[in-house]
Image (spheres, rainbow, N blue to C red):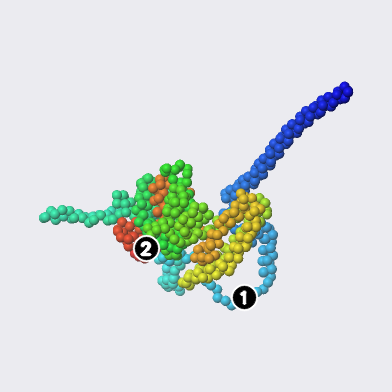
Amino acid sequence: MLRSVQNVKDILSKNAELSARLQVSEEHNRQLKERLEAVEQAHAQLKGDHSHTVERNVLLEEEVRWFKEQFFGRSSQKSSSDISADQKMLFNEAEVLAAIEAADAAQAARSTTIQAHERKRHSGGREELPAHLPRKDIPHDLPNAHKYCEHEGVCWAMDRIGEEVSERYHYEAPKVWVERHVRPKWSCPRCHSGVHIAPCPAHILPKTNASASLLAYLIASKFADGLPIYRVCQQLERQDVPLSPGTAGSWVNAIGEKVLPLIHLMHEELLSYPFIQMDETYLQVVRSDKAPGSDHYMVVRAAGPPGRRIILFNHERSRTTQALQNLLIGPQGAYRGKLLTDGLEQYDTVAEALDLLHFGCLQHCRTYYHKAAKVTELPSGQNLARVALNEYIGKVYAVERQIKALREECERTGETLPLERVLKLRQEKSAPVMAAFKDWVETLLPGVPPKSALGKALSYTMNQWPKLVRHLDYPEVPVDNNYLENQIRPFALGRRAWLFAETEQGAKASANLYSLVSCARINGLEPYAYLRHLLEELPMASTAEALEALLPWNVKPALQSRRIAA
């Protein structure tokens, strides 16, 4: 009995010990499990960080390759398949020269019969000089003693039988002279009724000593030729004209304010056209409420048919939706028509607020794929980008080149290419290509990293798709914004020289003057001639009709008359 009780006690004791050990083991297992979960979480985080690092490394390598291409590569977006075959042969110079020599030898051994034909007379390869330039004859004759010939012992005078003429361009430095406006004073010596004098001629800046011709030269040099004002003053100083850049700059800014009535007229007419293009470029303004290093913007609009085209620059402190929308509101209310822009989101809001028909730019889409083809490391990604460029976007632009050729052919005959023909070409040739392009993009998009160059190109295409294909139904609208980009290029080139605007007032004046110079150039006027005529006539323009007569497309007869008179 006692032994049984003892055995029971021993068993209970062992069970308690085992239970305690079991509890310790379970606690130990729990701790190990927690550590394992922590290790797995850390591993998952490290794996995610590694994937993020690899992806970021790929993106940074793409950006580095893109920057190198921007600085050292070709600016053209032509692919290697577009390079001339002759240019490719330059890498095999020895083989090419041997092939040429063999071809020449075979040609020399071959006898060919040439039929009778008329040879077109050539002028030695030199183009004739423009006929409208004035000529000044400079004679180079023989001495009189050499104009006689002794024949059979008799001295005979030679006859002039013709002449040899060679023409060369002659250049003279610009001439600066002083206008003296003399106004005689008259009075009656008997009645002494006072002094009589002719009124002072109207001048756009009456309290300055700058004529309209000098002001036009300053404006054309900066806004047409891209020269900073201080360089123009240095040129004038070489001609003994002491003009400080500060004074010249104040004159230019004052002119920029004086031409505001013309800018308002062009703004109203621009809003009357059914189709407007808009884009913007940056501008630095040193003295403003914003930090000196922050960007201001020049917003550029274009509209109008050939011969009456309008290009307007506007300075804006920022690219806010309200600032862009205000440019599409005139005295007659908000603009109602078609708007072509790039992919800036603010334009979508503007188009929705004003109920505009919004069109996208296929050139911006092509640029994304061009970048992907250059910077993507994997050959498969490069090939896909080239497929987009060559098989889809390139074919659409081939149709547009065909339309351009037809339009130029019609213009040579004095006709206009019917819009119905443009619409038919786009519907038959471009529409199927764009539909296949969309299917191709939708198939690829889920499997491409969204932040890669190719992923950005595919995402941009899908986000802009409704606007990119809208031109298929509207033949009067181009497929891209290249026309306006070309009008901004002179401003961008000039910005490299003069770098910034001093004040916001100067930026607004520059916008007005860039508008006038751009409108003159795009309508076939020489900027200096137009500016000189404008600055001479503007002080006397006191009516709306007189102001309209000074618009670029209305002054051609007056400029031609002045040119003939000169």
- Residue at (11, 55) in percent of width and height: 191
- Residue at (73, 34) in percent of width and height: 30
Query: What residue type is disc 1 on?
Result: Ile
Query: What residue type is disc 2 on?
Result: Val
Residue 308 vs residue 463: left or right?
A: left
Judge the density around disc 2: few (<14), some (14-19), many (≥20) Cα neighbours within 10 Å: some
Q: What number is the disc on residue 555?
A: 2
Q: What number is the disc on residue 114?
A: 1
Q: Is residue 500 visible?
A: no
Residue placed farthest to the top in the image? 2
Decide: is 289 above or below 355: above
Q: What number is the disc on residue 492?
A: none
Q: Position of residue 217 (x, y in %)?
A: 38, 54
Which of 180/496 is in front? 496
Which of 263/157 is in front? 263
Real-space CA distance between mark 1 and mark 2, rounded to the nearest whole angstrom: 56 Å
Which of 457/311 is in front? 457
Q: Position of residue 495 (x, y in %)?
A: 47, 49
Decide: is 177 above or below 407: above
- Residue at (62, 75) in percent of width and height: 114
Look at the image and tell me in which quarter the C terminus lies.
bottom left
